[in-house]
Image: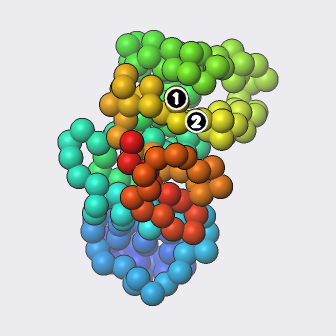
């Protein structure tokens, strides 16, 4: 099946490398990823899957990179998709509301005040404002273990991996 996908869609490098990452298929290490989004889903996912181990791993990823959870074998703390589906788990919804209001100083009402039109942009602003104090609070309360963050928004934690776009921090 995977072979058929590669034959039919040879011009879909993101799909190909993503499937390779998920299934642990070796990739051409000489190819350079110029796309930041593609880099997140390939290079960083490969590192996370190969080098970070343990059943208690809980990652904080860029809030708008919600598909990243499909590329890694670890749990993801919070993503943009959670805003769109808060009704599945009442306990989680309460926790999410607490995080949103008390840690990120926002609210569901503020995020949706103009419908879903600017929701992603507002979510990205919350991500850019995320700081070490909030992350340490999430470590204490929720067991967060690692953060994947764009290099232009550095954190004061030990870096365990870094490439041209992202750093992986151990909390």
| Separation (CA) of disc 1 from disc 2 | 6 Å
Is residue 109 at least partly visible in the picture? yes
Q: Is residue 45 left or right of residue 112?
A: left
Return the residue at label 1: 134
Q: Is disc 2 surrounded by few (<14), some (14 to 19) or many (20+) residues within 10 Å?
A: some
Quadrant location of the C terminus in the rendered image: top left
Give the residue at the far bottom of this rendering.
30
Q: Quadrant of residue 6?
A: bottom left
User: Colour scheme used in the picture?
Assistant: rainbow
Residue 118: x, y in percent?
A: 75, 34
Residue 81 seen in the current view:
no
Q: At numbered mark 2, what does the secondary structure look like: helix, strand or loop?
A: loop
Against 102, residue 58 (above or below) is below
- The residue at 40%/84% (across/down) is 28
Q: Quadrant of the N terminus?
A: bottom left
Q: Which residue is mark 2?
A: 131
Question: Badge 1 local density, few (<14 within 10 Å), some, or many (20+)?
Answer: some
- Counting from the top left corner in percent of width and height, residue 129 is at 66, 35
Spot the residue most to the right: 114
Q: Are marks 1 and 2 in contact (CB under 8 Å)?
A: yes
Locate residue 76, reporting x and y percent: 39, 40
Q: Which of these two is toward me, 33 or 105?
A: 105
x and y percentages locating residue 155 in the rendered image? 55, 46
Element type at mark 1: helix
């Amino acid at each position: 099946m995977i072979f058929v996908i590669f034959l039919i869609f040879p011009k879909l490098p993101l799909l190909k490398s993503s499937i390779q990452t998920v299934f642990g298929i070796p990739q051409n290490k000489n190819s350079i990823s110029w796309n930041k989004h593609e880099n997140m889903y390939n290079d960083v996912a490969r590192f996370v899957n190969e080098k970070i181990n343990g059943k208690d791993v809980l990652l904080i990823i860029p809030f708008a990179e919600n598909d990243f959870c499909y590329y890694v074998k670890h749990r993801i703390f919070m993503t943009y998709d959670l805003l769109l589906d808060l009704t599945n788990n009442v306990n989680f919804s309460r926790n999410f509301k607490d995080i949103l209001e008390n840690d990120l100083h926002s609210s569901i009402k503020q995020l949706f005040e103009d419908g879903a039109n600017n929701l992603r942009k507002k979510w990205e602003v919350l991500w850019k404002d995320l700081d070490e104090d909030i992350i340490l609070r999430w470590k204490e309360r929720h067991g967060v273990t690692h953060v994947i963050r764009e290099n232009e928004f550095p954190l004061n934690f030990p870096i365990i991996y870094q490439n041209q776009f992202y750093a992986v921090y151990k909390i």
